Amino acid sequence: MRLLKIVPDNTNIDFVRLRYWAFGLTTLLTIAAIALVVVNKLNMGVDFVGGIMIEEKFQVPPDVEKVRSVIDGLHFGDAQIQTVGDQKTLSIRLPRPDTADDAATNRIVNAVSAALEKNFAGAQFSKQDAVSGKVSGELVWSGILAVAVAVLLIGLFAIFRFEWQFGVSTVVAIVHDVLMTMGFFALTHLEFDLNIVAAVLTIIGYSINDKIVIDDRIRENMRRYRKMDMREIINLSVNETLPRTVMTSLTILLALFALLIFGGHVLRGFTAAMILGVIVGTYSSIYVSSSLLITLGLRAEPTPDKPGKPDVSRGAERVAPDER
Amino acid sequence: MLDFPRWKVLSIFGLLAVLMALAIPSFFSEDQVKHWPVHPRINLGLDLAGGSYLLLEADTTQLTTDRINQMADAVATSMRKAPQIDIGDVTSSDGKVSFMLRNVGQLEDARQRLSQMTTGVGTTGQRNWDIQVVDSTRFVLTPTKAGIDEAVDGAMSGATEVVRRRIDSLGTREPTIIRSGSTRIIVQVPGLQDPTALKTLLGKTAKLEFKLVDTTADSAKLAIGQAPIGDQILPYPGAPGGASYIGYPAANPQSGQPAKPPVIAVRRAAIITGQDLTSASVQNDPQTNAPVVGFQFNTEGGKRFARTTQENVGKPFAIILDGNVISAPNIETPILGGSGVIQGGFTFQSANDLAIQLKSGALPVALKVIEERTVGPDLGKDSINAGIKASIIAVVLVVLFMLVTYGRFGLYANYAVVINVVVIMGVLAVLNGTLTLPGIAGFVLTIGTAVDANVLINERIREERRRGRSVIQSVELGYKEASRTIFEANMTHAISGLVMLMLGSGPVKGFAVVLLIGIATSVFTAVTFTRMLVVMWLRKHRPQTINI
C-alpha cells in the first residue's frame, strides 16, 4: 500500500529569504487586527460587560422581527436578538437593570419567558446568564491576567530550555497569534466570551508547541553542523520539520472541523477561534518565529553548555549521521 | 531497542487496563452502579446536566455597622455593672465607638473592663478592637482589620450553613455550596428548571425579632422621626390607621400617596429572636383560612416569652422581620404554650418561604446574587449528544488520516488515541472531576494533539530511513529524538493548561482539567504504549524494510 505523503520528501524551500516579505505581511496583518479591534470593537458577551442573556428554543423557526417587537414591548431596554445554531433557537441579550435589586433580573427573565411563551406556542427557555458589572469586570481582568501569565511563563520556559532569542521570538509570535485572533473576532463580530479566553490560551499552548518543535530541531542542527551558516540551519530545520508541522495542523483541524460542524452551537465561537488560531499559529511558526532568530542575532557558534541541561550536552556529543 | 522485558509489557497493559476499567461506571446510570464495590463516575457540569449556578456576595457594610452598634450597647451595659462607672456621650458613628468618662479617677477601671471585652484574633497578635484614650477622658474603640476579618469570616461560615439548610429544604439532588474568597458563596443546583424559587429563598436574611411596642410614643413626633430615648423607629408597612402610637408620614403633595410607610417605636431590647425558635410551619388561620406561619419556641425562649407577655397584658408587641414590622398584635392573654403564629397577609408560597427561612435560621449577612447562570435540561442533553457525535466523528477522521499516512505505524497510533480517550475518562472519574461542555471540546482537541506525538515520532523514523539507517536503528532514533521534543512541547502545553486551571473561571477550568489529564495520559499512550507495540512487531517479524 502506498502511503499518503502530504509534504514531499526533502523539501528545500528558502523560508529565510522570504522573511522580509513575511515580516511585512505579518506587520500589516497585525496592524489591521489591532485597527479592527479598536474601530470595530469586540462583541463582548455578558461575561465581560454584564447583562442578561436568554436563549429561547422555539418549535418552528420564529419570525425574528416579531420576537423583537414582543421584547421591545416589555421595555427592558435595547435587545440584541440573533439566531444561534439551528434556526429554531434565538439568543436575546438585554442590558443589566440599573437597580441594585437582584429580583429585577428575575422579573426580566420571567417576563421575557412568559411573553414569548404566550406569543409563540411551545417556546421554551433553554439557557440564561445574568452577570453583574462587578463580576464582569473581574472576569475581564482574570482573562487578561491568565493570557499574560501564560505568555510570560512560556517565554521564560523557552529561555530556560534554549537561548534568550528563542524566548523572545516565541513571545513575539504568540502575541501575533493572540492579536490575530482578536482581530478575527472584531471582524466577524462573533461573541467574545469566557470560552474564547480558553480558546486563546489553548491557541497559545498549541502555537508554542509548534514553535518548540522547530526550535528544538534548530538547536539540534546547530550542534550537528557547527560550521553551517545560521540561515541554512534554520532553512534546513524548518524544512525537516515541515511534514510534521503540516500533518499535526491537519489532524487538529480535522478534529476541530468535526467539532465546528457537529459540536452544537454553544461551542461554535470557541471552535472558530481554535481553527483560526491553528492556521495563524502554523504560519507564525514557519515564517515568523524561526526567521526572527536571525534578526535577533542567534549565532551558530556553540555557547558554553549551561549547567543543569544534561540532555543538551548529550546531544552535542552525538555523532553526525554521515559518520555511521 | 528490541529489549522490552515481559514485566514491562505486563505492567503497561495492566496499568492501561485498570485506567480504562475506571471509566466503565461512567457509561452506566448511577443507580445501576450503586452496588459495585468501586464506582467512580464522571460528574456532569451544569452546562451538560442542566441546572443553576449562583454567585452570592455578602454585603458586609451592614455587618460592620451592626458590630459597632452592638459594641456600643455592650460598653454601656458593662459600665453600668456594679461598681458603676459613670459614662456619657456614647456614640457609634464614623466606624468607631466613643464615650466620655465623667470621673477621671475611674480611667484604669474602665480600661480594664474594656480590655476584657476585646479578644485576640487567632495568631495575628492583634486584638479585635483597638482601645485609645483621647484627652484623658474620652475612650475611642476602633475595630481592627483583623477583628473585622474575623467577624466577616464567622458570619460567612454561618451564612454558608444557613444557605445549605435553605437549599436542602427545596429537596433538590446534590446541591454544591462552597465559600469562595472572603465574602462569596457559590451555589450550584443541578437539574433545577427555574432559579426563581431558589433566589427568593436566599434573598431574605430572615432575622426575626419580637419587641415590645412603646405605646407612649407620640404619633406626630414619630412621623417626623423622633422617638423616646431607648426606642428605635421601624417601618410598619401594613399598619392599621389611627393608632396613637404609630407615626403616619405626610403624603407626597404631588401623588397624594404617603412617601414612606408608617413607623412604629419599639424597645431596643428584643424579647425573643429567631434563634429561640425550634420549628416553623405553614398553617391556616382557623377564622379567615388565610395562610399563617406557626412557630414553636425552645424551652428557654418559651419561658421568657411567657414572662414578658404576663407582665404586658393589654399592650402590643411587634413581630419584626429584617427590620420591618410585619404585625403588632395586642397581648390579649399571656402566651404560655411556647408557640404562636405570625399573620401578615401571606400567600401560601410566601408563608412557606418564611417558614423555611425561619427554620433554617437567619443569615448573619445579607447576600446578593452577582452572577447567575441557568441551563435548561434540554439544552444540556443536546450539548452532550452533539459533543459525543463530534468526538466520534473526530476520532474516525483522525484515525483514517493516520492510517493512510503512516500505515502500520498509524494503526499503532490509532490504538493509542482510542485507548487515550477512555483512559482520560477513567482518570477524570477517579479524580471526581466534572465534565463540562468546554471539557468535551478539550477531549476533541486532545484527540488532535495526542497524535502529534506519533506524528513527531513517525516523521522522525521516515527521516532516519531516508538517511539510510536500518529499520531498527531508525525506529530507535525516531523514538529517542522525538521523545525530547515531545516532552518540551507538552511542557509548554501544560503551562497554559495550569494557568487556565488556576486563573480561569468555571467553564475554562473544566476545559483545563481535561486538557491537563490528556497531556499526561497521551504522553504515556502515544510514546510508551506505541513503542511497545512497535517493538513487539519488530521482534516477531524482523522486517528488512518498513512502509512508513
Image (cartoon, coloured by chain):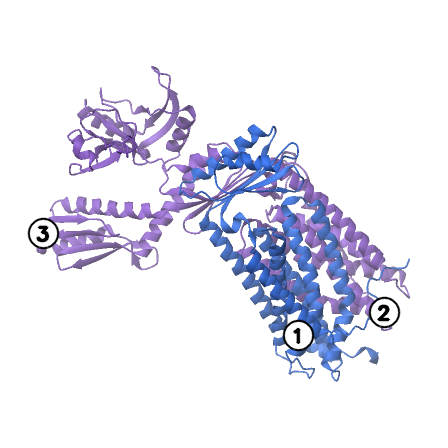
A165 and B476: which one is in front? A165
* Chain A colour as displayed: blue
Which quarter of the rendered picture does the C terminus of chain A lie within? bottom right
**Residue located at (75% from left, 73% from top):** A15
Which circle's residue, 3 or 2, is located before the other in the chain? 3
B101 and A255: which one is in front? A255
Q: Which mark is residue A292?
A: 1
Helix, strand, or loop for circle 2?
helix
Q: Which mark is residue B465?
A: 2
Question: To which quarter of the image does residue B190 belong?
Answer: top right
Helix, strand, or loop for circle 1?
helix
Chain for numbered disc 1: A
- Residue furthest to the front in view is B254
Question: To which quarter of the image does residue A274 belong?
Answer: bottom right
Amino acid type indicated by mark 3: Arg
Q: Is residue A158 above or below residue A123?
A: below
Amino acid type indicated by mark 1: Leu
Q: Which mark is residue B102?
A: 3
* Chain B colour as displayed: purple
